[in-house]
Image (cartoon, rainbow, N blue to C red):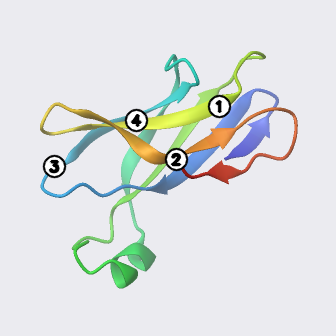
C-alpha cells in the first residue's frame, strides 16, 4: 500500500483462483466497508514463472481508495465468476507508521 496524498491510497498485488474468473475487486476497511475499487488483468509475468499452474501473465490488480481517520486495516476482496466473494491473502496496516503488508 502506498499513500498517494492525505487519505488517498494505492494498493496492488496479484490474485489467482482455480477455475473461477475474477469479476471485480473492492478495497475495504477493517469493518468491510468499501473504501475503493481495483482493476484486474495487469501483466505480472513474475507470478506465472514461479507458480506453474498460473497460465496467464495478466493476474495482477491495482486499486485506489480513500481512507478515513478511524480506518486501521485495508483488505481486498475479489468477486469470482462463481458468485463468491474471496478475501485476498493479505491486509494493509494503517496507523500513522509506514504501512506494511501482513499475511493472514
Q: Which residue is drawn at 74% across and 15% down?
A: 70
The residue indicated by pointer 3 is 20
- Pointer 2 or 4: first along the chain: 4
The extreme front residue here reads 104
Q: Which residue is drawn at 72% across and 50% down?
A: 100
Helix, strand or loop at mark 3: loop
- Pointer 3 or 1: first along the chain: 3
Q: Do the residues labelled 3 and 4 touch (CB within 8 Å)?
A: no
Query: CA gap, disc 2 to disc 3?
Result: 22 Å
- Label drawn at residue 82: none
**Quadrant of residue 31 within the rendered picture:** top right
Q: Residue at x 53, y 35 (%)?
A: 75
The x, y position of residue 39, in whole percent, is 41, 43
The x, y position of residue 22, in whole percent, is 25, 45
- Pointer 3 or 4: first along the chain: 3
The x, y position of residue 104, in whole percent, is 52, 47
Helix, strand or loop at mark 1: strand
Front position among marks 3 and 1: 1
Closest to the observer: 57 or 19?
A: 19
Helix, strand or loop at mark 4: strand
Query: CA gap, disc 3 to disc 1?
Result: 27 Å
- Compared to 47, does 69 lie above or below? above
Q: Are marks 2 and 4 in contact (CB under 8 Å)?
A: no
The residue indicated by pointer 4 is 77
Query: CA gap, disc 1 to disc 2?
Result: 12 Å
- Compared to 96, does 101 lie above or below? below
- Pointer 1 or 2: first along the chain: 1
Query: CA gap, disc 4 to disc 1?
Result: 13 Å
Amino acid at each position: 500500500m502506498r499513500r498517494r496524498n492525505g487519505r488517498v491510497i494505492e494498493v496492488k498485488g496479484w490474485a489467482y483462483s482455480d477455475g473461477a474468473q475474477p469479476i471485480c475487486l473492492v478495497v475495504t476497511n477493517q469493518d468491510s466497508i468499501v473504501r475503493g475499487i481495483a482493476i484486474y488483468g495487469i501483466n505480472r509475468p513474475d507470478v506465472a514463472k514461479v507458480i506453474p499452474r498460473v497460465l496467464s501473465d495478466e493476474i495482477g490488480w491495482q486499486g485506489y481508495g480513500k481512507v478515513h481517520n478511524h480506518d486501521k486495516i485495508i483488505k481486498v476482496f475479489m468477486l469470482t465468476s462463481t458468485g463468491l466473494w474471496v478475501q485476498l491473502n493479505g491486509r494493509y496496516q494503517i496507523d500513522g507508521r509506514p504501512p506494511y503488508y501482513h499475511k493472514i
